[in-house]
Image: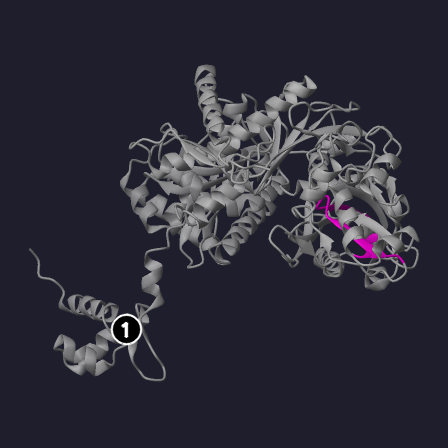
Amino acid sequence: MTDTHTAGPFIAAIDQGTTSSRCIVFDRDGRIVAVDQKEHEQIFPKPGWVEHDANEIWANVQEVVAGAVRKAGVTRDDIKAIGITNQRETTLVWDKNTGEPVHNAIVWQDTRTDALCRELGRNVGQDRFRRETGLPLASYFAGPKARWLLDNVDGLRERAEAGDLLFGTMDTWVIWNLTGGVNGGKHVTDVTNASRTLLMSLRTLQWDEKICESIGVPPQMLPEIRSSAEVYGEITGGPLGELLGGIPVASALGDQQAALFGQTCFDEGETKSTYGTGTFMLMNTGDKVINSYSGLVTTVGYQIGDQKPVYALEGSIAVTGSLVQWMRDQMGLISTAAEIETLAMQVEDNGGAYFVPAFSGLFAPYWRSDARGVIAGLTRYVTKAHLARAVLEATAWQTREIADAMTKDSGVELTTLKVDGGMTSNNLLMQTLADFLDAPVVRPMVAETTCLGAAYAAGLAVGFWNSTDDLRANWRRAAEWTPRMDADTRDREYKSWLKAVERTMGWIDDES
Amino acid sequence: MARNIQSLERAAAMLRLLAGGERRLGLSDIASSLGLAKGTAHGILRTLQQEGFVEQEPASGRYQLGAELLRLGTTYLDVHELRARALVWTDDLARSSGESVHLGVLHQRGVLIVHHVFRPDDSRQVLEIGAMQPLHSTALGKVLSAYDPVAHSEALESERRAFTDRTVCEPDAFENVLDLTRARGYAADIEETWEGVASVAAPIHDRRRMPVGSVGITGAVERLCQEGELRPELIAAVRDCARAVSRDLGAGRF
């Protein structure tokens, strides 16, 4: 998307994601100047295990950074800083003397630490470390993944205790390599990524020594925790050093936090939701660490330099876009994802049908692993078009449930929902969201909010932008959907949805 | 009832023959199956081949059904697919032009707005997805009428209302406007639909060069025009956007 109207200087952002690595160059208005992207291999050694080759990822990152800079047609003098956003929780351990990973990276979706997490819960259970870390003991998070590596790769624990090994999430791996690797690379992470390890205290923003000991991760292998927007070091060495040497590496944010930042949700109560295969909704809760009693996760939203950290509540929905894919690939009712809207538009309503896609249990706010998917309310009247409606409504109702949980925990009502991600091109879904939430839904003009967030944070760190007010001025409304549903209909429909949710529970009998 | 055209009947019989049983047939097999002289059969097959409905295997010289037949049933482009493909490009057009962007397709003798991006100035605006615009006076509608033969006949047959003093309603004058649109590759509407409002639009084509929609910007005539003419950089931005979306549609169905 090159554009001859934009002129330098620029900020670059790396998005080291789950399926690919990308680099985008932005101008001062936050407009995209150039993009480059490369996918990497998904490695499945066993059912439930997912790994990435960290060397392949680093090679791809170098390639896409060089590619984006080449496409933008700019030189190192035009680029004022580079920022990083990344797939969260994916865990790597490498040798600090050789720079070689000791094992493939264990990806966030990997469930090999299920049993370990149950064992770590001891008699307390999932919430053993929740008060300190904001997180339940679940296989997603990084700390137990590191412990698994130390337990299962020969000689690792000794090398770790001798101080030869480094732990990191993907932000740490990319920054260490960008800033020189074995030749003085900076071993750092940011508060948002650290808040997904189960090892950091939300209040002190430091590694919690007691928890590190309980989980079994030696503190000497952990990176230094820094803010999300500050200069960690400069691009040094290697082919990138020749191309872009000296450019400050100036931000790191987990992908969902980066989207919160890119959507400029800087005030308490501002909320964004990203609609992809799954959906991640984050609400800015200001300087308050809010313990969730409704099945949400407490996390760090961002921290700019030496300012106070900003916290967030997070709720995730496992199945949203993937339900549309399921209608396409498994049911064959549509031939492209966009056609779900065409099919759904053939009818006025859901015809009484409700679809609860609890394919692998119910997540927030219920957390019931014994639940399985249900299509409820079927009659002979129901057509595939009604089911298409029910599919879109499922995403909207699940968003409503998370929003209700956030209001309950924080006491803050949702006034507007800022949305991004692929599903925002679905007009019917966006209108349904506004109707079910009874709040306006707005889409910003730049769809790449994740990369934009990393670019914004890096730009703030080097003074390219002066304040979050500058960034807000860049935010542009591309579309807004306002609620049109009357309250009675909404309440009646919500009740039916909740009834359908009820029907999913207890399907699996022997849940250990 | 008028007599049927014999060569079309024969061509249809050939396609049926190639569709059933053995899939590849030689010229003499086809001619004898249908009781035709070889020369007659060859003439029809050559015409079908030129249209892509029949293909000839180079090595054996045998005939089989062509890829064009398969495409006939699948050329319909879902409008929501069109919106999904257009999203990033139309966002960028709104940003670079500073005006609102609309994407329209032909629907019931008018232009159906299937995508709308707000003017990036933070003012209150209402989403116009689902609204209808006239074919003969708006830039979006003129583009469709100029490039899509169905839209063309619908625009000619329906009543062309004069919304302002500048609306072009007479058939000859309207045809001239469409000629100009095709020659320039874009259409303009300077206060022909709404007083004080101008718009400019360009065609979106799919991978087979079929016109599938039009995309354009709309705004105050004072901003879009200079000395009564549309500003050239805005025309260029609209055409760039239309080309980018067309390119995206040509890259394959997914």
Amino acid at dot 1: Arg
| Residue A156 place in picture, x, y as percent | 84, 55
Q: Determine the residue located farthest toward the left in the rendered image.
A: B1
Residue B3's quadrant in the figure? bottom left
Q: Is B37 in front, or is A235? A: A235
Residue A281's quadrant in the figure? top right
> Dot 1 corresponds to which residue?
B23
Numbered disc 1: secondary structure: loop
Residue B163's quadrant in the figure? top left
Taking the image as shown, residue A323 lies to the left or right of residue A61, namely left
The residue drawn where x is 52% and y is 48% is B85
| Residue B199 place in picture, x, y as percent | 50, 38
Circle 1 packing at 10 Å, graded few (<14), some (14-19), many (20+), is few
Taking the image as shown, residue B58 lies to the left or right of residue A266, namely left
Quarter that holds the N terminus of chain B: bottom left
Q: Is B125 in front, or is A191? A: A191
Is residue A28 in view?
no
| Residue A321 place in picture, x, y as percent | 53, 41
Taking the image as shown, residue A180 lies to the left or right of residue A377, namely right
Q: Is residue A474 above or below residue A411?
A: below
Verify whether residue A86 appears in magenta: yes
Q: Is A224 in front, or is A369? A: A369
What segment is highlighted magenta in the picture?
A: A75-96
Label 1 marks a residue whose chain is: B
Q: Is A250 in front, or is A476? A: A250
Is residue A127 in view?
yes
